[in-house]
Image (spheres, rainbow, N blue to C red):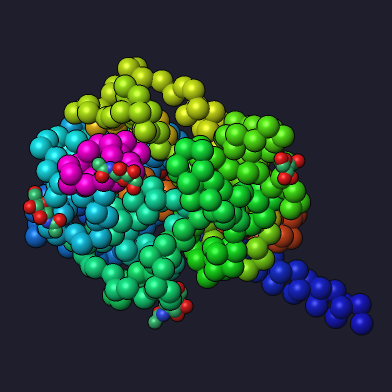
Amino acid sequence: MKPHGKNNNNQGSIIHGSTSKILLIVTLTLITLTLIPFHKLPPSLSTTTTTHSGDPTTVSPPPTHPATAVISVDDNHHKCDVFSGEWVPNPNAPYYHNATCWAIHEHQNCEKYGRPDSDYMKWRWKPDECDLQIFNPYQFLEIVRDKRLGFVGDSVGRNQMQSLICMLSRVEYPIDVSTTKDDNFKRWYYVSYNFTLATFWSPFLIKFNEPDTDGPTHTGLYNLYLDEIDEAWTNHIDEFNYLILNGGHWFSRPSFYYENHQVVGCKYCQKDNITDYPMTFGYRKALRTALNGIINRKGFKGVTILRTFAPMHFEGGDWNKGGNCVRKKPFRSNEIRLEGSNLELYVAQMEEFKWAEGKAKENGLKFRLMDITQPMLLRPDGHPSRYGHWPEENVTLYNDCVHWCLPGPIDTWSDFLLHMLKMEGRRSAEEKKWQDRRLYLAIDLVDVEVRLVDLVPVVENSGEEGRATVG
Ligand SMILES: *[C@@H]1O[C@H](CO)[C@@H](O)[C@H](O)[C@H]1NC(C)=O
Ligand SMILES: *[C@@H]1O[C@H](CO)[C@@H](O)[C@H](O)[C@H]1NC(C)=O
Ligand SMILES: *[C@@H]1O[C@H](CO)[C@@H](O)[C@H](O)[C@H]1NC(C)=O
Ligand SMILES: *[C@@H]1O[C@H](CO)[C@@H](O)[C@H](O)[C@H]1NC(C)=O
């Protein structure tokens, strides 16, 4: 009995030991493999290879190994703040024109309405500590294959979506698969990539209505339900992989603020018995309600990107008092500062985002920031101004210093978006790496400790080599 049992035990422990060893080696191989693609990609597979030109026919062919290209972001990019930098000349831009892209909204079709200069199209964003790749539509579409991306917010969000459609138009135009006739809720489908792009109109991001289309400033008077989500979008996000939220500008409009169905204040409603609050009062609460709405939506598993707000550039007066934007080139970063209500809105966004990001993480959700405020602050030259309509036309926003000409600086948001999606790929790989580590720690710890001593130099070496390659 005893010898037999002992024998069995021995055998058991030998098998056990070698299983651990195999698992360990497999795990370390996995870790090494997940590390290698970032550092040791052959140049032909790296993300830097696409050549760009204004001529749509000279776009490089799709990468042959798109899956590899997806996560080839190097360490330098990992640490670099891509939103801090300067605009530098880019003679290759733009990458489409009004004649090649039908998605341009009338009021942003500056070429059509005779804007005489074109230098405003010819800049790219250069982060201080790294390079931001110019948008590669093939790579983007590979990354979003079989996925759904939704824009939620106001007309600047729509402006961004139309810019993205135009940037992708060198590869494919989407078909209209909208489920309603309401132009504020469009769905576009890229047949070859099974990719859906949608836009949800929600200028305040929360439940609202407009009881008076005129109001004290003739821009409407709104009821904002600060503690109620806007089901026009929250009910439809479950199947979305990415949401890009934006909002801010509309909170300057006269509004009544409701909480718990009661009026708790207003923004410029001109009523003696109602407290008047600054726009950030409503904005903070609305943002919190909207972000909470995403966190509490059990079926939603996607990545939420808050696109920070893009400053307006009225000079010489407000939008309705003769203000205009007539500059012809970008500012340098030392020439202008975020201040006043722009700064207040930005701070409100950052604080609410930070709060929600932490809460989302606890719930296993990913919240990211597309922090374009500073880059766009530097672009007073990119708005339609009076080239968003015919001179004799009677439009509310005669000089538009809010939206962005297409083509124009807003096209750079697609560069940022692609960069963020690539980083997302890298983050997922890293999270997988940590999962692998945890799996490996779950193996018999005593055995592992012994093997670890043997194997540590191997891991270190591959790390060192990686760093050396990046330089
Ligand atoms: C494009 O812009 C040109 C002027 O550059 C204009 O003549 C033409 O009508 C515009 N086309 C469209 C489709 O907007
Ligand atoms: C298309 O993508 C959706 C997810 O957006 C997925 O459920 C579906 O299976 C995909 N269809 C094909 C044919 O791959
Ligand atoms: C303010 O006064 C008006 C009448 O002057 C009244 O109808 C309204 O309910 C009052 N609002 C609040 C919040 O007290
Ligand atoms: C423009 O429209 C507004 C309101 O619709 C009107 O009051 C104004 O007189 C119009 N101006 C011109 C020049 O037609």
Q: Relative to 413, say whether 323 is above or below.
A: above
Q: Is residue 253 left or right of residue 50?
A: right
Quarter of the image for residue 312 reads top left
What's the magenta bit mostly, secondary-structure-wise? loop
x, y (%) of residue 314?
34, 29
Looking at the image, in which quadrant does ligand 3 appear? Answer: top right
Q: In the rendered structure, does residue 397 fall within the stretch colored magenta?
A: yes
Q: Is residue 422 left or right of residue 223?
A: left
Q: How many marks?
A: 0
Which quarter of the rendered picture does the N terminus lie within? Answer: bottom right
Q: In the rendered structure, does residue 86 fall within the stretch colored magenta?
A: no
Q: Is residue 123 left or right of residue 263?
A: left
461 and 321: which one is in front?
321
Residue 429 seen in the figure: no
Quarter of the image for residue 16 reads bottom right
Magenta highlight range:
384-410
x, y (%) of residue 447?
71, 57
x, y (%) of residue 125?
29, 35
> In the image, what residue occupies the spot 65% across and 44% down?
257
- Residue sitting farthest toward the right: 1
Residue 274 seen in the figure: yes
217 and 133: which one is in front?
217
> In the image, what residue occupies the spot 35% across and 39% down?
402
